[in-house]
Amino acid sequence: MIRVNFIVENFKALKYLGCSTAAQQILEAIEDEDIEIKINSNEKNFDIVHAHTFGPLVWLQILRNKNAVKIISAHSTPSINKNNIVFGGSKIWNIIYRTIYNRFDYVIAVSEFSVRELKSIGVNKEIFVVENGVNMKKFRYDKAKAKEFREEHELEGDFVVLNVAQVTPRKGVYEFIETAKLMPWAKFVWIGGFPYKFASADYFKLKKIVEKNAGLKNLKFLGFVPDIVGAYSGADVLFTPSFAETFGLTIIEAGACKLPVVARDLKVFRELFGNYIEYASHPKEFAKVLERFKDKNFREKQSLKAYELAKRYDMKIIGGKLVELYKKLVKWKDET
């Protein structure tokens, strides 16, 4: 039996971050009698300490389990701090990430794109790729939840363009607003808040914008919602204009709920998602692509493509890949 301790600083609003969501989905999906996984346990004698964040909980567990294999998942890299947190564009982050990641035995990246960035900043530990996954049992289209979501937020009969993300410039919030201005006939809905509070980029400016929905009648900032499946099921298209990502978890979550996707044309998205989703690069182009989804036949075709994409990242597949890695790393340690 291999004992694994997941460490995730998922307190309060931080539980809505992608790294927390990804860790929880892995925990729920792995079903292997040879693997026992706990999360944020204070116990000792773990074979593996697997960090998904790098706050104080991580270092405490490493001290308690000095002989464990120490792994960190690189959900975050310097490039996604820019325009996301205060001083996120500073080159000091390269040093911080390099120093932290090199203190572990192994690093897990969520994409080949991230591997290249990690190596470019000087991470010299062996890096394995285990992509993010989606729990297809949890994330699936639900007609009743869709109806409830639309009724609760007064969206009955509307064409709904959804995004699920932190409210930061990095996530493309200003472009989301500009696109909404170009499409007054559609309802734009943004779910997510400010997990970093005052440390979020443009916090005070964006807080005022969010409180007034940017002064637009067709735009709603809903903050955090308790059941995201209802939102994915109740929308017509996911629109993610993010400027930088290591993966793009919401894209496969949406796909699992049969929600088609329009995303900014990023290299990481092209490498991971190929032609399963649609791409654009600026508000006028976003609006032009989104307008195509008014056509029911086109929307249904894209919905099926998004669902096929999600199946490629089914957590059963990703979880199995992670389990095999655990077994290999523990074996390597036993042989040395």
Image (spheres, rainbow, N blue to C red):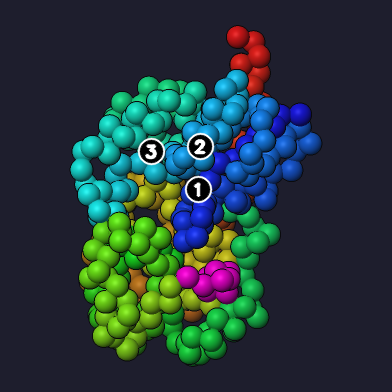
Q: Count neighbours of disc 2 (C-alpha within 10 A) and say few if under 14, some if 14 to 19, many if 20 or more.
A: many
Q: Who's the residue at 58% across and 61% down the image?
A: 256
Residue contact between numbered discs 1 and 2, judged by CB atoms under 8 Å: yes
Q: Where is 261 relative to 230, above or below?
A: above
Magenta-drawn segment: 224-233
**Image spot of residue 269 (x, y percent):** 39, 50
* Residue sitting nearer the eye, 44 or 308: 44
Q: Who's the residue at 60% across and 9% down the image?
A: 336
Give the residue number, with chain letter if any, for mark 3: 114
* Residue sitting nearer the eye, 44 or 168: 44
Q: Residue furthest right?
A: 33
Give the residue number, with chain letter if any, for mark 1: 9
Q: How many marks?
A: 3
Q: Secondary structure at mark 2?
A: helix
Give the residue number, with chain letter if any, for mark 2: 58
Question: Is 227 inside the magenta-drawn segment?
Answer: yes
Q: Count neighbours of disc 3 (C-alpha within 10 A) and say few if under 14, some if 14 to 19, many if 20 or more.
A: many
Amino acid under label 3? Answer: Ser
Quadrant housing the N terminus: top right
